Amino acid sequence: MSKKVNSVKENNETGQPASDGQTGRSLWLRFAVWNAALAGGLALFLLLPVMIPALRMPCPFHDLLKLYCPFCGGTRAVRAVLKGQIVEGIVMYPPLVWLLGLFTAFEITAVRACLRKSAPLVQIRSWVTWATAAVFILFTIIRNILLIAYGIDPIGDLIEFWPHQAG
């Protein structure tokens, strides 16, 4: 006996058509869930240490070496930007411009993928990863040189440990 082959694949359990790719609705759902999780994580990251000071994570780089790590000031900069103090946030943590640019590019790419009903929503190319690492490394080196050699400390946490000698 030969079975008749349908032109539409069916799910064996439900009899509903099965899709080989993502549907538009499931892509938008993934996009919404990702952004909700990101917003929730950001809110917890920014609010919990303020509400419960014991949750503030110490930075061994900052505390032991009296130098800034690649992430020192990032939380304060994001808080400043969320309060509308964009220039202050960028002065405090310039890589924020790079990160906001990446976030915007990823969001635009994800929306385009949802509109086209194509997955994956975002693919991160290796050059983006390397460029991001370079931004953080260069920023850390430049910021600590400015602190030690010239007494420039936009955050103001470590200037007392590195008094600048004029002259």
Image (cartoon, grey):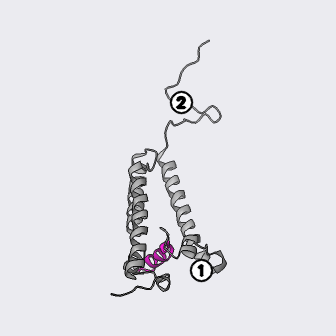
* Dot 1 alpha-carbon crowd within 10 angstroms: few under 14, some 14 to 19, many 20 or more: few
> Residue 11 vs residue 139: left or right?
right
Q: Residue at x 59, y 17 (%)?
A: 3
Q: Position of residue 145 (x, y in %)?
A: 40, 73
- Most extreme residue toward the front, as rendered? 167
Of residues 7 and 86, the one nearer the viewer is 86
Q: Residue furthest left?
A: 167
Residue holding disc 1? 50
At 49% from the left edge and 44% from the top edge, which residue is drawn? 23
Label 2 belongs to which residue? 9
In primary-sequence order, the first of circles 2 and 1 is 2
Q: Nearer the viewer, mark 2 or mark 1?
A: 1
Chain part drawn in magenta: 72-84
- Quadrant housing residue 101: bottom left
Q: From the viewer's perspective, is 139 left or right of 76?
A: left
- Residue type of the residue flagged with mark 1: Val
